[in-house]
Amino acid sequence: SFKIVLKFKPDIILGMGGYICAPVLLASIFMSRKIALHEQNYIPGRLNSFFSRFARYIFISFSDTDKYFKVKKNKIIFTGNPVRKAVGQSKNIKPEFKKWGLEKGRFTIIAFGGSLGAEKINNMVINLYNYFKDNDKIQILLICGSRFYNQLVKSEKNIIESKGKFILKIFPYISEMQEIYRISDVIISRAGANTISEIIECNIPSILIPYPYAVANHQFYNADFLARKGKAILIEDKDLNEEKIIKIIELLIKDDRKRYKEMKNIEIRDVKTNSAEIIASKLMEN
């Protein structure tokens, strides 16, 4: 790390959290280089908390995360969390249902467990089939993760190939998430920082199941932020089962989707469409 800092002679170094940043940040401090930090989660991680005293700037993704940093408030800048450009522009693209084997007009639920998938979420979604198999008003697209796909296709072949009224489509991985967000009415997912930022950006109500083994339980606090705003329903992993999800789905769609529309219309102010530009501009001042 000392060699890297010495070779590149950076004017300022941006740490994004995680222990991989620690050696470079330490080297920067010892060599009198300026550092800045970006905190993606609602509750700051240990590394960002420790290095905050040395940072020139601390960029935060949620407006009230500043209360968790014990530093001068003029160091802290609410920037939001940068999302992929394509995701930020998803509202401008045409919804494509047929491409994903879905039908326009149905209540569309997208379920995923992060980039690697989540077996518990996968199993829960599969178990919804027997309850909704005669329902022609709902459809679910499950992004199960590459490591689970072959097993699911083999064990759930009858469900996947079913010609019943209910539509359930399973994909191992989808890179064009901007298209998926565009057709989604509700998201069922974990509560990682990037997922939270993207569903806020795309204004999608969600059912969030925080990963229970995340460091400092940060996914719970990410999900709790949206749940307190009324934009999400939080279910802890230990409490997850298909009966709860069924009740929530039925609540959202009954009375002409009244509850769903209420959630959809809630405005989350913790959105910065130009987060990356704000951060870059501030760093360039140095």
Image (cartoon, grey):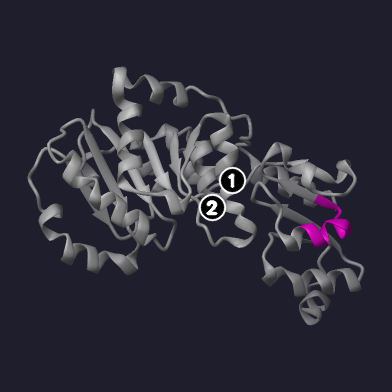
Residue under the point 81% across and 49% down: 69
Question: Is residue 92 in view from this perspective?
Answer: yes
Mark 1 residue element:
helix
Residue 95 in percent (x, y) is at: 31, 35
Tell me the quarter of the picture where residue 18 sits.
bottom right
**Which residue in the protein does label 1 denote?**
222
Q: Tell me: 93 left or right of 159.
A: right
The chief SS type of the magenta part is: helix
Q: Between residue 118 and residue 92, name the one nearer to us.
A: 118
Residue 123 in percent (x, y) is at: 29, 56
| Residue type at the position of mark 1 | Asn
Tell me the quarter of the picture where residue 145 sits.
bottom left
Query: Dot 1 surroundings within 10 Å: few (below 14), some, or many (20 or more)?
Result: many
**Which residue in the protein does label 2 denote?**
192
Residue under the point 14% across and 41% down: 133
Q: Residue furthest bottom?
A: 3
Q: Is residue 129 above or below residue 202?
A: below
Query: Dot 2 surroundings within 10 Å: few (below 14), some, or many (20 or more)?
Result: many
Residue 98 within the segment the image draws in magenta: no
Q: Tell me: 56 left or right of 165.
A: right
Tell me the quarter of the picture where residue 183 sits.
top left
Mark 2 residue element:
loop
Q: Tell me: 163 left or right of 160.
A: left
Residue under the point 78% across and 52% down: 283
Q: Which residues are magenta?
A: 49-57
Residue 233 in percent (x, y) is at: 47, 37
Q: Is residue 70 above or below residue 214?
A: above
Q: Residue furthest left?
A: 163
| Residue type at the position of mark 2 | Gly
Residue 102 in percent (x, y) is at: 21, 40
Residue under the point 35% across and 43% down: 180
